[in-house]
Image (spheres, rainbow, N blue to C red):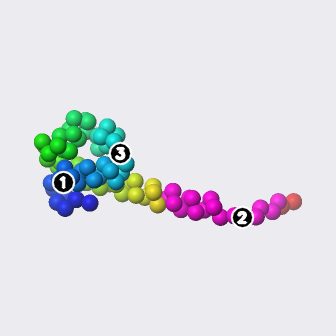
Amino acid sequence: MFDDLNNPKPSEIKRWLRDTELTVSRGAVALGISNRQLLRFLSGETNAKRVHALAMQMIWLLVEENKEQSKINDVNQNIKSIQIPIK
């Protein structure tokens, strides 16, 4: 996800927001930082630290896992089954 985990680039953070389908405010809440701080990361005014990059990767992994689970659930719901009542 990040070329340099110790210093993620603003473009990589923008890609993270797009990939996780988060807004700036939701992304800031997920990372536990203010909207202003996330906007500083996005503008390049302040460099994101390693801890922020690790948190972003963890959130991305959780989002991807949820996507996989929803695909599995969709497939399972489309399987037709016969229910036979037992007396």
What residue is shown at x 20% (from left), y 45% (from top)? 42
What secondary structure is found at the residue carrying circle 3? loop
Q: Amino acid at mark 1?
A: Pro
Residue found 40% across the figure and 58% down from its top: 64
Give the image location of residue 57, x and y in percent: 29, 55
11 or 28: nearer the viewer? 11
Spatial CA distance of label 2 from label 1 is 49 Å
Please say whether residue 59 is visible from this viewpoint: no
- Image quadrant in which the N terminus is located: bottom left
Q: For residue 80, what is the image quadrant?
A: bottom right
Quadrant in which residue 33 is drawn = top left
Q: Which residue is mark 2?
A: 81
Q: Secondary structure at mark 2?
A: loop
Give residue 54's position: percent from left, percent from top: 25, 54
Relative to 70, is 40 on the left or the right? Answer: left
**Residue 70 inside the magenta-drawn segment:** yes
Other residues around mark 1 within 10 Å, as few (<14) / some (14–19) / many (≥20)? many
Q: Quadrant of the C terminus?
A: bottom right
**Residues at marks 1 and 3, CA–CA distance in whole angstroms:** 18 Å
Tell me the residue that label 1 is attached to.
Answer: 8
As drawn, is 69 to the left or to the right of 6? Answer: right
- The residue positioned 81% from the left and 62% from the top of the image is 84
Residue receiving disc 3: 22
Q: Amino acid at mark 2?
A: Ser
Give the extent of the magenta segment.
69-85
Does residue 72 appear anywhere in the picture?
A: yes
User: What's the amino acid at mark 3?
Assistant: Leu
What is the tally of numbered marks visible in this picture? 3
Q: Residue at x 23, y 41 (%)?
A: 38
